[in-house]
Amino acid sequence: MLKRVGVVAVLVMTVSDAFGDWQTVKLKYEAPKDGFRYPTRMWRGADKEPPTNLKETPAAMATKHPVYFNIELGPKADELFAAALDESKGDGKGYDRAFVDCNRNGRMDSDEMFTAKNGADGFLVVGPVELRRSKNGKTIPWAIRIEWRPGERDPYPMTTIGFKKTGYAKLNGKRVRVGLMDERLNGRFGLRFQGSIILDEDVDGKFDMGTGESHILGKYFRYQGRFYRLQVDENGDWLKIDDAIVPVGKVWSECKDSDLSFQDNDGCLSVSTDSNGVAEVPVGTWWWYGYHAMFKQDGKTWRVIGDSQRNIMQCDVGTERTIRLPSLQFTPKLTATVRGREINFEFKLEGRWGEQVSNINQLNPFKQPPEPKLILSGPDGKVLASLDFKPG
């Protein structure tokens, strides 16, 4: 009787061989003091009338036409902070400062008035301004900034909010400041698709959120051309970084020197294409869903930001072939909504997969395309109204 004899090769390897050496980085809360661009939280109810949570209007208010709004840290009443834009030089001279009810006492005191400065991308900026609120029995400072475009009679104020925990990691032989951002303002840092990892990549002592030093949480992040695996504590007390080499494949896009957004079941990943349109992506199954695409027209470079509510394309990234992404196409769409005697018009660009183009602009200096004009005419062809669309 014959017996089948199998030869078994046993591969012995340690955890550090398979996954590298995990370093643990302890983090602590840090109130932002430097220039920053954090997750945008839009105002609630910008109006010419004070919000109900403001009992007294500022005595130092110089304009007769202030713009009131609420800074919204959450859906509850005690998470709203009243604010107002003011023209310090009088009506028609331009909104150049802001009042904020930082302690929610129903009024805006003299120490709650903040003068605007010229910020990046052509905005006027107030902040950081520190708000204080209670959460889980603790008093937590939230740093915010307010920005709006100068010269507008009806400014569109936006608030950006910062709350981060930071520490130091050793990456590529360098001591680098790293941290986590709580983007949902719920005190939970390690939630995939919600928080962000931040890295002081240029080692200038601050996090420049507008220049690629912030990345949405996933199982990977990239530093100086190399991918690292990542584990994060949900409470933001620590993060772990794996030093093992991550195998990568390539994707190609017609958009050169642009940013592409991917996601898998463990989080998101943003990568940049080079001058040939090629980007490296860790091996695995990804879904392409968004982009910051750069296009050249008449000698000018335009950035187009598109974000789909659904996945555009599945990408099975391997080491042996380059995946080609389909070209981008855009269609203008005009919609009208009738509410009683009022008609609201909306004009937007939509991508070929239904993704909404949220912004088009030039950089350095920041410039948006001319605002579209809506012309309404009657049956006889006589112009009844001519209106300019506003961003947002």
Image: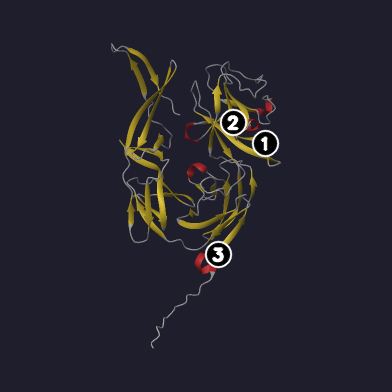
Residue at the spot of label 2: 71
Disc 3 is placed on an element classified as loop
For badge 3, the amino acid type reads: Asp
Residue 163 in view = yes
> Is the C terminus in the top left, top right, bottom left or bottom right quadrant?
top left
Image side of residue 6 versus residue 86, left or right: left
* Tag of residue 21: 3
Tell me the distance, in whole angstroms, between the alpha carbons under discs 3 and 1: 39 Å
**Which quadrant of the structure image shows residue 282?**
bottom left
Image side of residue 228 versus residue 114, left or right: left
The local crowd at label 3, few if under 14, some if 14 to 19, many if 20 or more residues have their Cα within 10 Å, is some
Q: Is residue 293 above or below residue 79?
A: below
Tell me the distance, in whole angstroms, between the alpha carbons under discs 3 and 2: 43 Å
Are circles 3 and 2 on residues that touch, CB within 8 Å?
no
Tell me the distance, in whole angstroms, between the alpha carbons under discs 2 and 1: 12 Å
Q: Is residue 28 above or below residue 130?
A: below
Mark found first going from the N terminus, 2 or 1: 2
Query: Foreground residue, 250 or 378?
Result: 378
Q: Is residue 319 above or below residue 9?
A: above
For badge 1, the amino acid type reads: Arg
> Is the N terminus in the top left, top right, bottom left or bottom right quadrant?
bottom left
Residue 205 in view = no
Q: Is residue 125 above or below residue 163?
A: above
* Tag of residue 133: 1
* Tag of residue 53: none
Q: How is the image coloured?
A: secondary structure
Disc 2 is placed on an element classified as strand
